[in-house]
Image (cartoon, rainbow, N blue to C red):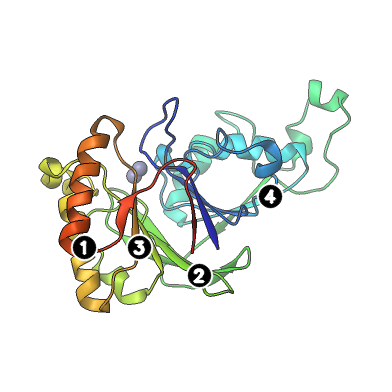
Amino acid sequence: MELRILGAHDLESKNTHPTCLLIDGRLLIDAGGLASSLTLSQQQEIRAVLLTHHHLDHTRDLPTLGFNVILWQGQVTIYALPQTFDIIVPCLLDGRIYVDLLKNPTLVLKGAMCSQNILPTEEKPPLKLCEIEPYEKETIAGYEVLPLPVNHSVPSVGYLVTSLAGGSLFYTGDTGPGLNDCWHHINPKLIIIEATAPSRFTEELALRGHLSPQSLKEELSQFKQLKGYLPRVIVIHRALPYEQQIKEEIDQVAIELDADIGLGYEGMTISV
Ligand SMILES: [Zn+2]
Ligand SMILES: [Zn+2]
């Protein structure tokens, strides 16, 4: 399984994108920095999107993807908690802010596009929604996917993704402290986790459902104690203004835990 990090931050700028991970070119987790990272033909390979929660830095490119999917008359299935759909459908997908991506695309392709003879003929919407249930394994795009609840300011899950070849990764999404329940359910070869700001903000980050390098260290220590090992750990969802300080603090955590812990960057690929 090959993981490509498309977005490793919590904001968009010239060289950074919000959180977005791509597995083997076809399974996307979160849709923060998707469209500006992939060509149209690469976007055409995407079969499914797993959403951790509804916040805009994790969902903002869904309307763009859906609109592009209309071009090749395809369909992408979006997997998320019902509470996530309750927010993103009226805010992003049902036609109020952009085109209606949940209806037959013949209803939304008009004007210039019709004259180019690319009007879809199939009766299928560009985006299909599928609710997930925490702790329920599902096969999605050829992978075994296990959603596990995490502590964030809104209903959120992390995902354990396992390939047929045995590669596995766990991505927490946005999370505050309290991952011990997740740790009981997983034995991944890679953990993708967040550290939003430096450790001097640990307390207020916890209140907002985020981690600092200090609280991340406590969570990973618990994993190591429980499982007897610590896999490679990649840290994303960093606030750009604190990039250097977060890096220094994460480097220190890696030394203290004697583990392979480093930052993820846009464009980085990792074989799992
Ligand atoms: Zn969030
Ligand atoms: Zn976020």
Q: Nearer the viewer, mark 3 or mark 1?
A: 3
Answer whether labels 4 and 1 touch (C-beta < 8 Å).
Answer: no
Where is 191 relative to 115, above or below?
Answer: below
- The residue that disc 4 covers is 45
Q: Residue 113, position in %: x, y? A: 80, 26
Q: Residue 66, position in %: x, y? A: 64, 40
Crowding at mark 4 (Cα within 10 Å: few <14, some 14-19, many 20+):
some
Q: Nearer the viewer, mark 2 or mark 1?
A: 2
Q: Earlier in the sequence, mark 3 or mark 1?
A: 1
Q: Amino acid at mark 4?
A: Glu
- The residue that disc 1 covers is 219
Mark 2: secondary structure: loop
In the rendered picture of this protein, how many numbered marks are placed on residues?
4
The residue at label 3 has a CB less than 8 Å from ligand 2 = no
- The front one of 38 and 48 is 38
- The residue that disc 2 covers is 167
Res 13 seen here:
yes
Q: Earlier in the sequence, mark 2 or mark 4?
A: 4
